[in-house]
Image (cartoon, rainbow, N blue to C red):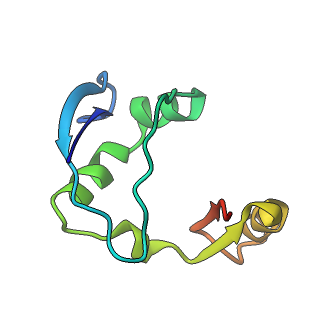
C-alpha cells in the first residue's frame, strides 16, 4: 500500500512530500485512513532542531522497532496520570491510546 507523507530528512531543512510504501498491519493492529493532518509548533521544533528524521530513517529501514521503546500505554481517560508519571520520572516513553 502506498501513502504520501511529509518526511523530515535532515534537521533544519524542510520536510519532503514523498510517496511511501507501507507494510500491511500485523494481526493485532488495524489500518486507519487519515483524511487530513496538520503540523503544530512541536513538529516545527523537532524539524528545526531535533532528531526525528534520524529515528524515522532507522525505523523505515527496520533497524529499530519504535513500538518496543514504549514503556507504558495509557488510555485516553488516564492522560493526566500519564503526564504525572512523566513529570515524576516514573515513565519516559508513555503513549496515550484511544480505545473504543
Q: Is residue 30 above or below residue 1?
A: below
* Residue in view at x 82 percent, y 62 percent: 77
x%, y% of residue 67? 42, 70
Q: Quadrant of residue 41?
A: top right
Q: Position of residue 36 (x, y in %)?
A: 49, 28
Residue 44 in picture, x, y percent from top left: 49, 28
Residue under the point 49% across and 30% down = 37
Single out the residue that lies furthest toward the top.
14
Q: Residue at x 29, y 51 (%)?
A: 56
Viewed as shown, does residue 71 lie left or right of 46? right
**Residue under the point 72% across and 67% down:** 75
Front-lying residue, 68 or 1: 1
x and y, in percent, of residue 55 in the image: 31, 54
Q: Is residue 38 above or below residue 66?
A: above
Q: Nearer the viewer, residue 15 or 4?
A: 4
**Where 13 sits versus 92, above or below?**
above
Q: Nearer the viewer, residue 1 or 41?
A: 1
Q: Quadrant of the C terminus?
A: bottom right
Instruction: Tell how many labels.
Output: 0
Question: Which corner quadrant of the image does residue 82 belong to?
Answer: bottom right
In the visual, does 99 lie left or right of 60? right
Amino acid at each position: 500500500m502506498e501513502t504520501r507523507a511529509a518526511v523530515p530528512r535532515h534537521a533544519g531543512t524542510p520536510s519532503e512530500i514523498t510517496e511511501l510504501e507501507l507494510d500491511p498491519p500485523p494481526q493485532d493492529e488495524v489500518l486507519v485512513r487519515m483524511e487530513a493532518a496538520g503540523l503544530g509548533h512541536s513538529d516545527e521544533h523537532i524539524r528545526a532542531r531535533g532528531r526525528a528524521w534520524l529515528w524515522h530513517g532507522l525505523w523505515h529501514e527496520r533497524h529499530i522497532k519504535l513500538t518496543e521503546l514504549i514503556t507504558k500505554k495509557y488510555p485516553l481517560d488516564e492522560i493526566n496520570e500519564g503526564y504525572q508519571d512523566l513529570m515524576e520520572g516514573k515513565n519516559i516513553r508513555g503513549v496515550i491510546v484511544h480505545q473504543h
